[in-house]
Amino acid sequence: MLNAKSLLDNLVGGLNQMTGGQGANGLTDKAKAAWNNQSTLGKGAIAGGLLGVLLTRGGRRMLGTGLKIGGMAAIGGLAYKAYEDWKAGRSGGTEATALPAPEGSAFNPVEGAEADDLATHMLQAMIAAAKADGEVSEAERAAIDQQLDVLGLGADANDLIRAELDAPLDVGRIAALAGSEAEAAQLYTASLLVVDEANPAEKGYLAMLAARMNLDQALVDNLHAEAARL
């Protein structure tokens, strides 16, 4: 049975543990050389977690030291701070980010099924965002499949990741995963942490996602401000 929250936390945690929270700069010289010689999506596997395959292509912010407490809690905390500031009419990024969000809130659910559903949706959103600049090449996909075979994540986790990699990029499908405004803010945050905003295709994907989710522009601005602090 898939435990999506544990999967998300372990993948992000494994990546940060391997790199000391410093991305490629935290690797040994030998590992760094291997990192630099890997194909785009495949290089993340060197960092100790499959999620790294989806996050390391442009020095992703999720590799920073601000996300050591666990993938879902960290994303929820960022979204919660931005959301609360937005509701209060404040601009984001003006104070230290409070991580994690309050337990039991929509940003940090404690019920197993609720937390698992949210983590599943976050994983789906992140994988989709990582594909926003184009299709995964055959070589990149082969590298991912090879890592899935050796990481021991379990059949359910492998099936989820492979299904999302195989699915056509559909921003409407990802937007429809959000069952509330709070979840929409978190799925947007998860996507934001994956994309490279300097890439026009990825920047455009984020804009479409925000529009499909009917996120207020002031909230979107706050989410970007919080992510920029990492």
Image (spheres, rainbow, N blue to C red):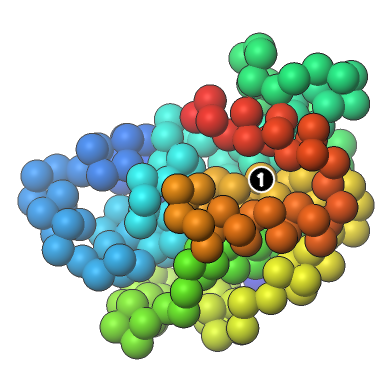
Q: Is residue 103 visible?
A: no
Q: Quadrant of residue 45?
A: bottom left
Name which residue lies at 75% across and 20% down. Answer: 91
Q: Would residue 75 be visible to someone looking at this image?
A: yes
Q: Is residue 131 above or below residue 146?
A: above
The residue carrying mark 1 is 189
| Residue 198 percent across, percent down from the top left | 45, 48
Instruction: Identify the residue at the far front of this view.
Output: 200
Horizontal and vertical percent position of residue 86: 83, 27
Residue lying at 46% horizontally and 79% vertically, measured from the top left:
135
Q: Secondary structure at mark 1?
A: helix
Left or right: residue 103 compared with residue 147: right
Identified at 90% across, 26% down, the residue is 87
Residue ID at (62%, 77%): 169
> Compared with residue 164, is residue 54 higher up or lower down, i.e. above or below?
above
* Front one among 140 and 103: 140
Q: Residues within 10 Å of mark 1 (few under 14, many from 20)?
A: many
Taking depth in this image into account, of 44 and 200 the one nearest to the observer is 200
* Residue 107 spot, x, y in % from top left: 79, 40
